[in-house]
Image (cartoon, rainbow, N blue to C red):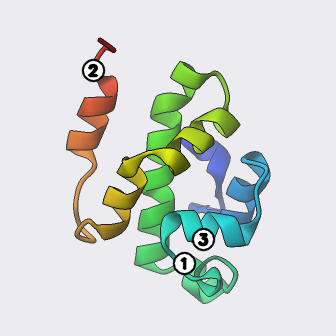
């Protein structure tokens, strides 16, 4: 699934993401390290922090989905990987380049 599948009106849409991943908004917020208000209130959804976290997750999911065969399996992997915890504590302007390079490496 492309990153655009998670967006609506030029922003990442948490409810659309939750629907595609067959999860709840509360669970999605917890996975991203955000409070549930951050993905339910329009002003908080549009905030840089919320959009950054949603974008990071969408980028990782779109990168690993071909490996797992579905968005739901990619999301299950994302939730279980320490990578999720790393993204939660990384600096706000930290770029995903290193993580994306690691994901692109062939399996051993």
- The local secondary structure at tag 1 comes to loop
24 left or right, relative to 73: right
Which quadrant of the figure contains the C terminus?
Answer: top left
Which quadrant of the figure contains the N terminus?
Answer: top right
Task: Say if mark 3 contacts mark 1, CB within 8 Å.
Answer: no
Which numbered disc, 1 or 2, marks the residue that appears first in the sequence?
Answer: 1
Task: Say if mark 2 contacts mark 3, CB within 8 Å.
Answer: no
Q: Note whether 13 is above or below 96 in the view shown.
A: below
Q: Position of residue 10 (x, y in %)?
A: 58, 61
Which numbered disc, 2 or 3, marks the residue that appears first in the sequence?
Answer: 3
Q: Position of residue 8 (x, y in %)?
A: 67, 59
Q: Position of residue 22 (x, y in %)?
A: 79, 50
Q: Residue at x 48, y 52 (%)?
A: 57
- The local secondary structure at tag 3 comes to helix
Q: Residue at x 23, y 54 (%)?
A: 95
Q: Nearer the viewer, residue 75 or 45?
A: 75
Q: Position of residue 103 (x, y in %)?
A: 33, 30
Q: Note whether 98 is above or below 94 in the view shown.
A: above
Task: Please identify, in this view, whether the residue under mark 3 or under mark 1 is nearer the observer.
Answer: 3
Which numbered disc, 3 or 1, marks the residue that appears first in the sequence?
Answer: 3
Crowdedness of circle 3 by 10 Å Cα count: few (<14), some, many (20+)? many
Picture quadrant where residue 73 is located? top right
103 left or right, relative to 56: left
Q: How far apart are labels 3 and 1 at the CA level?
A: 14 Å
- The local secondary structure at tag 2 comes to loop
Q: Residue at x 67, y 86 (%)?
A: 41
89 left or right, relative to 30: left
Find disc 3 in the rendering and name its residue.
29
Crowdedness of circle 2 by 10 Å Cα count: few (<14), some, many (20+)? few
Find disc 2 in the rendering and name its residue.
105
Find disc 1 in the rendering and name its residue.
46
């Amino acid at each position: 699934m492309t990153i655009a599948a998670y967006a609506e009106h030029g922003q990442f849409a948490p409810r659309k993401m939750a629907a595609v991943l067959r999860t709840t908004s509360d669970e999605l917020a917890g996975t991203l390290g955000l409070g549930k208000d951050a993905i339910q209130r329009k002003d908080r959804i549009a905030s840089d922090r919320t959009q950054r976290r949603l974008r990071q997750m969408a980028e990782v999911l779109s990168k690993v989905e071909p490996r797992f065969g579905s968005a739901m399996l990619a999301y299950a992997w994302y939730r279980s990987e320490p990578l999720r915890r790393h993204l939660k504590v990384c600096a706000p302007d930290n770029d995903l380049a290193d993580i994306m390079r690691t994901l692109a490496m062939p399996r051993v």
